[in-house]
Image (cartoon, rainbow, N blue to C red):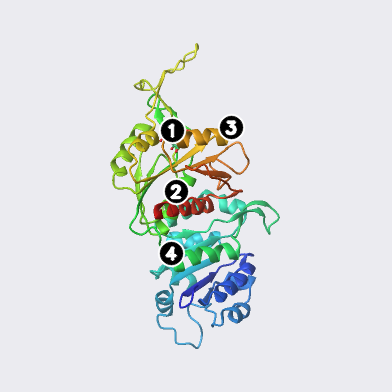
Amino acid sequence: MLKGKRIILGISGGISAYKSAELCRRLKKEDAEVIVVMTQAGMKFITPLTMETLSENEVVTELFPQGKKVGARHISLARWADLIIVAPATYNLIGKISSGIADDILTTVISSTKAPVLLAPAMNVNMYENPICQENIEKLKKTGYRFIEPGVGDLACGEVGRGRMAEPEQIKNVILKLLAGKKDLTGRSILVTASRTEEPIDSVRVLTNPSTGKMGYALAEEAFERGAKVTLISGPSNLATAYGITLIRVRTAGDMHKAVKNYYGKSDVLIMCAAVSDFTPQIIYPGKIKKEKAGLDLKLKPTADILKQMGRRKGKKILVGFAIETRDELRNAKLKLKEKNLDLVVVNNPEKEGAGFGVDTNIATVIDKNGKIEKLPLMSKRELAEKIVGRIIKLLKK
Ligand code: C5P
């Protein structure tokens, strides 16, 4: 499936470099042409000989190799590539790229390419969760770099947590999708809502929920990569969107309602993934409410059910809703599907481990309007996004 595609496999210095050999093999099996570019630290973990044998190409390790005419080799490599995958991408390498440092052959090639760059981070959990690393990742995502999230599990350093490099097969599948994937949403406009809303109580307090936006952002990215024009209406979130997605930031349920109404007309699909507040304070107190010993009664009024309203003027659009249920999941989700006139409802129970707010994984059940129920196992939110977008594509073809 990758015949004629030219891939640079960058290897920086992490123990997961042993998996890069397998990744190289798998890319070659798909008939890709692969050139491996290694950092000095990368070569401490796996030899250039191994990579040369597997890639069937000379391995590039030096910015200034002795005795060779170099010219602008980093530029010709950068131009040659249809895609660059760096696996493993270490804390140091991610930091260097995000700071604009290009002091070895790999970072120099990356800095001068126009090809998509994929990074598969691998490191100790504390390094990965270090706010500096997370900030670097967010910054790179905004600039268009694509990350393949590390998994959770035993790490080579003896600790347990997030930091294991994604498996070669998973990385290969992302590459396949990017280079050989069908752009089956080309020409379609998809509107996605994500994250939470915040309803002000006074000038310093809000009524909200823990939704971070991970599921909605994953859906927006998946639809974008499959060729759709994507507008993402997001409540407060620290996440970055891929370059090319139109991001509209909102705060309250009222703001989100207005934004959805604005974009709904031009959309073929609405995926309402945001955890919209069902209530908002009747009045917003000016300034900060003083601490009262006797307590405080807040009067709340319901917000508009955005999805239900859009369901009333559905036309030929595809509508997808999300439902968070802690009991009677299927029954309640089916009721919502009917009441809001949806094509699909995705239900999850945040009380299950690995599902719900803030985590990178989810356990969901997808129900369609004919009552067909698809129970999905634990998977990353990105994988779930792939499944949901796949279902939407089928519905659009009908
Ligand atoms: O009825 P419930 O709030 O559980 O339904 C959840 C679905 O409805 C989600 O898709 C959510 O985005 C949407 N919703 C909405 N407007 C609200 C509340 C929820 O569109 N005010």
**Badge 4 residue CB within 8 Å of ligand 1:** no
Compared with 205, 19 (above or below) is: below
Q: Position of residue 219 (x, y in %)?
A: 45, 50
Q: Going 38% across and 69% down the picture, which residue do you hit?
A: 114
Q: Distance from label 1 to label 4 (Cα)?
A: 34 Å
Residue 120: image x %, image y %?
54, 61
Q: Tell me the mark number nearer the camera, choosing from 2 and 3.
A: 3
Q: Which mark is residue 217?
A: 2
What is the number of the mark on residue 328?
3
Q: Residue 330 is drawn in which quadrant?
A: top right
Tags 4 and 2 touching, CB below 8 Å: no
Gap in Å between the C-alphas at discs 2 and 1?
26 Å
> Residue under circle 1?
339
How busy is the neighbourhood of tag 1: few (under 14 within 10 Å), some, or many (20 plus)? few
N-terminal of the pair, mark 4 or mark 2, is 4
Front: mark 4 or 2: 4
Asked which secondary structure carries label 3, the reply is loop
* Residue depicted at x 44% and y 72%: 109
The answer to whether the residue labelled 3 contacts the one labelled 4, judged by CB atoms less than 8 Å apart, is no
**Which residue is rendered at x = 56% and y = 82% of the image?**
56
